[in-house]
Amino acid sequence: MPDMMQKYKQEIRPALQAKLGCKNVMQIPKLEKIVISSGMKAGVERDTFAEAQKQIAAITGQMPVITKARKNVANFKLRAGMNIGVMVTLRGSRMYEFLDRFVHNAMPRVRDFRGISPKGFDGAGNYNVGVPDIAVFAEIDQDKLKYPLGMNITMVTSASSDAEAFELLKMLEVPFADQGK
C-alpha cells in the first residue's frame, strides 16, 4: 500500500470527518481518480504521439490512450478521427503513488516554485493543474526528450464543494500558494 494511501486511511480521513462534521463515513471526501492528459497540435508528425505515450507511460506506470477528434473544426484544420492527444486515468494505488511523486518530487523541481494556484477548482470539487514541461519528473531523461510536452492533471474528488476538496488536497500535502499574495 502506498504511503500516501495509508496516510489518507489512518490520519486524513478521521481528521476530515471531525473538521467537516461528517456523520457517515461515506460522506468523507476522497480522491477518486487522477486524469493526466496532453494535447498536441493538429497535423504534427506521427511519432509525436508515440513519444508522448512513451513519456507519460514512464511517468505514470500505465500506458495512455491516443484521443481522437470527435468532429471537424475548420479553424483548427481538424478532421473527425484525427489524433489530437494522449490521456491516462489513474485509480487506486497507482493514483496515490503518482500523487506522492508529483507533490514531493516533481513540484519542488519547478524553478521559482511558490505553490500551485488554488483557483483551479471547477465548482464541483475537482482540481485542475497544468504542468508546462514534463521534464520536472525524475523519470524523464531530458536528453532523450524529442518534443516539448506539457500536460494537464485533473484530480477528481468525491467532495460536494470546492472548500471540502481544498481541505482534502491540503491534507494530502498538495502545495497551494498563499491566497493573500
Image: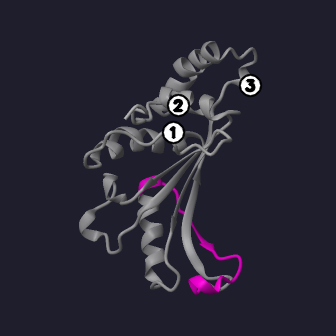
Could you tell me which secondary element the residue under label 2 belongs to?
Answer: helix
Q: Quadrant of residue 14?
A: top right
Q: Is residue 66 magenta?
A: yes
Residue 47 horizontal/vertical position (percent): 44, 81
Q: Position of residue 155 (x, y in %)?
A: 57, 44
Is 131 positioned to the left or the right of 80 in the image?
left
Snapshot quadrant of residue 48 = bottom left
Q: Give, as a three-letter code, the residue at label 2.
A: Met
- The type of residue carrying mark 1 is Tyr
Picture residue at 57% right of the left edge, 58% below the top: 88
Number of marks in the rendered image: 3
First in residue order: circle 3 vs circle 1: 3
Query: Are dots 1 and 2 in contact, CB under 8 Å?
Result: yes
Residue ID for mark 2:
5
**Residue at 41% from the left image edge and 59% from the top image edge:** 58
Q: How much space separates mark 3 and mark 1, taking CA atoms?
A: 19 Å
| Disc marking residue 134 | none
> In the displayed structure, would residue 66 be above or below residue 155?
below
Residue 129 image offset from top left, x and y in percent: 49, 49
Residue designated by label 3: 26
Magenta part of the protein: which range?
59-77
Q: Which residue is mark 1?
A: 96
Task: Pick the residue in front: 154 or 96.
Answer: 154
Q: Is residue 43 above or below residue 96?
A: below
**Which quadrant of the figure has residue 83?**
bottom right
Q: Which residue is pictured at 35% across the width and 44% down the height? A: 107
Is label 2 or label 3 in front? 3
* Between discs 1 and 2, the one toward the N terminus: 2
| Distance (Cα) linking label 2 and label 3 | 17 Å
Question: What element does badge 3 sit on?
Answer: helix
Q: Earlier in the sequence, mark 2 or mark 3?
A: 2
CA neighbours of label 2 inside 10 A, class few (<14), some (14 to 19), many (20+): many
